[in-house]
């Protein structure tokens, strides 16, 4: 490490500054969230007993679970289908599947808002869950496709030669092999859903505020210590998820 | 659900694509088509939509008031993209050239802000640069300044907020490309007498072009439609295209105008992405030619 630093000291000092710029606010938030109360966790206790914040947290978790379930199911199925698919319309199918990655989020949110209004779906938990499942699934497809590419097709052929039905081969051979990717893509989908602001903001109703939306509207009316605590809590949650995902990936590649 | 029906020895599950396709058509393709169709319709009284062809939603974009906002957004997106690029490139470079353990550590450090909720990041930033934020409190405590330096509720706040938010989106694609870069090429250039500047301009940048373009698009497109950062860190007068679209839909119930603006945004990003994929292909061909 010292050798690397001595080779390019200016670059590493610069890197330190830039990372400092990215991290100082996050560290400040974490520190401030424990300060100024009679006890260490005072603002956390206050935040987690605020009915509105609890309600928002509840919504975030419900929407997260719902959309993760849908996105992981759809995405896994699509990745399996895409694996050996090769036909003329493939490019077209591919471009539809990648649409959420290309579209500006604001447009995706608004177009769904217009559509939900048109078909009379009440804006609320359901509409947000549907919207989240839509933008999360391409990430699932990408992650599971990447994993499928690394699987030796001979394994399945061997199973078939030994008399296994495609159904058995799938559950006994293929599925265990992609399971780590399914788990990490589900975690990823949950994080994406939990973190989303724009699409929730547009497709949500009066009673379906998620945490980010709640924090946004509170922030417009000034800063309260409970907000530090709840924001820091979300930050810690994200940190934990990132750690788990990277650990899963490491285990996977070993 | 038996796939024996396919009768082939290789396990193909083509029908499994159907649910996802149906889902995407229902929740993406149809809604987008709606926006596109609405953008050519006429806005009646009380936000009702009249089914009459009307191109004026697009021409209104060029009215002085709106055009000013569009240009302001273009400028902000350019500024954000350029600054992020200049700031991110040296970091991505040093990350790519670090030994493996250090590389992974740096990558981890970049990924955490990338995944952190952006409302929370903006909030955290406000704790630092706000009027009663850490910087102002410290400087006032030290007696260096008497009045807080205004870094929020103005353009400075918007600028810092945009850079802070979009920086990770630039670092990661640059890093991914530079990571695959063969750095011995740089030594070769030095040996042949090229100076640092020439090596950067003639070797490093052209050969990492796909990452540069991807990073710039990752920043430019969302930055162009951004409205939350100006809303939270900018002054009351900082209206951008994102605010305009949002207000057209949520406040003024002028769906046709909002749809026209959205369609323009979609068109821009489609062009940008065509540009990247063709750029990436060009690079792929180059790499294959060696």
Image (cartoon, rainbow, N blue to C red):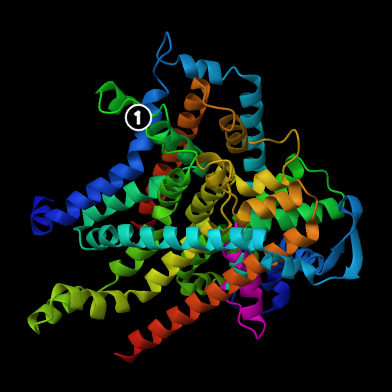
Residue B9 or B243: which is nearer the viewer? Answer: B243
Residue A140 is a magenta residue: no
In percent of width and height, residue B110 lies at 35, 50
Residue A103 is inside the magenta segment: yes
User: For the stretch drawn in magenta, what is the main secondary structure?
Assistant: helix
Q: Write down the quadrant of residue B26 in the picture.
A: bottom right
Residue A216: horizontal and vertical position, in percent?
58, 36
Q: Is residue B29 visible?
A: no
Q: Residue at x 59, y 28 (%)?
A: A221
- The quarter of the displayed image where residue B281 is located: bottom left
Looking at the image, which residue is at 51% across and 27% down? A230
Q: Which of A244 and B29 is in front in this view?
A: B29
Question: What residue is rendered at 47% in x and 74% in y?
Answer: A154
Residue B58: x and y, percent?
73, 69
Q: In screen coordinates, is A4 left or right of A203?
A: left
Q: Give the range drawn in magenta.
A: A83-105
* Position in image of residue A98 (x %, y %): 60, 67
Location of residue A19 with respect to B77 vertically, above or below: above
């Amino acid at each position: 490490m010292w050798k690397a630093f001595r080779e390019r000291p200016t670059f590493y000092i610069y890197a330190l500054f830039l990372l400092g710029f990215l991290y100082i606010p996050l560290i400040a938030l974490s520190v401030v969230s424990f300060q100024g109360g009679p006890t260490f966790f005072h603002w956390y206790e206050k935040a987690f007993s605020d009915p509105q914040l609890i309600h928002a947290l509840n919504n975030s978790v419900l929407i997260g679970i719902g959309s993760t379930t849908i996105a992981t199911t759809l995405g896994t199925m699509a990745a399996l289908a895409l694996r050996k698919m090769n036909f003329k319309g493939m490019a077209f199918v591919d471009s539809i599947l990648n649409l959420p990655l290309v579209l500006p989020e604001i447009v995706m949110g608004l177009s769904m808002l217009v559509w939900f209004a048109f078909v009379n779906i009440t804006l609320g938990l359901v509409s947000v869950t549907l919207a989240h499942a839509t933008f999360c699934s391409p990430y699932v497809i990408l992650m599971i496709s990447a994993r499928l590419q690394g699987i030796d097709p001979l394994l399945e052929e061997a199973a078939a030669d030994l008399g296994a039905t495609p159904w058995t081969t799938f559950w006994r051979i293929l599925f265990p092999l992609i399971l780590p990717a399914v788990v990490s893509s589900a975690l990823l989908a949950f994080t994406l859903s939990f973190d989303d602001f724009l699409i929730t903001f547009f497709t949500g109703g009066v009673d379906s505020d998620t945490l980010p939306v709640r924090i946004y509207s509170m922030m417009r009316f000034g800063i309260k210590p409970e907000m530090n605590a709840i924001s820091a809590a979300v930050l810690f949650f994200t940190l934990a998820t990132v750690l788990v995902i990277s650990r899963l990936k490491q285990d996977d590649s070993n | 659900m038996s796939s024996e029906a396919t009768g082939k020895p290789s396990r193909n599950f083509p029908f499994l694509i159907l649910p996802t396709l149906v889902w995407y058509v229902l929740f993406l393709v149809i809604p987008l088509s709606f926006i596109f169709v609405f953008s050519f319709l006429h806005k009646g009284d009380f936000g009702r939509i009249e089914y009459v062809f009307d191109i004026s939603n697009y021409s209104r974009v060029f009215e002085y008031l709106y055009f000013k906002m569009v240009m302001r957004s273009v400028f902000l997106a350019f500024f954000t993209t350029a600054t992020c690029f200049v700031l991110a490139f040296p970091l991505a470079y040093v990350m790519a050239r670090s030994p493996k353990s250090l590389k992974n550590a740096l990558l981890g450090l970049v990924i955490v802000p990338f995944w952190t909720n952006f409302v929370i990041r903006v909030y955290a930033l406000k704790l630092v640069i706000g009027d009663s934020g850490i910087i102002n409190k410290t400087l006032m405590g030290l007696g260096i300044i008497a009045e807080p330096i205004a870094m929020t509720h103005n353009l400075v706040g918007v600028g810092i907020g945009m850079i802070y938010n979009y920086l990770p989106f630039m670092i990661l694609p640059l890093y991914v490309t530079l990571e695959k870069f063969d750095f011995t090429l740089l030594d070769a250039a030095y040996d042949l007498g090229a100076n640092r500047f020439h090596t950067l301009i003639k070797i490093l940048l052209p050969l990492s072009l796909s990452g540069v373009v991807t990073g710039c698009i990752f920043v430019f497109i969302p930055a162009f439609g951004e409205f939350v950062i100006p809303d939270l860190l900018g002054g009351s007068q900082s209206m951008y295209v994102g605010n305009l679209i949002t207000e057209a839909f949520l406040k003024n119930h002028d769906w046709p105008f909002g749809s026209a603006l959205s369609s323009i945004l979609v068109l821009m990003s489609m062009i940008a992405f065509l540009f990247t994929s063709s750029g990436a292909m060009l690079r792929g061909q180059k790499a294959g030619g060696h």
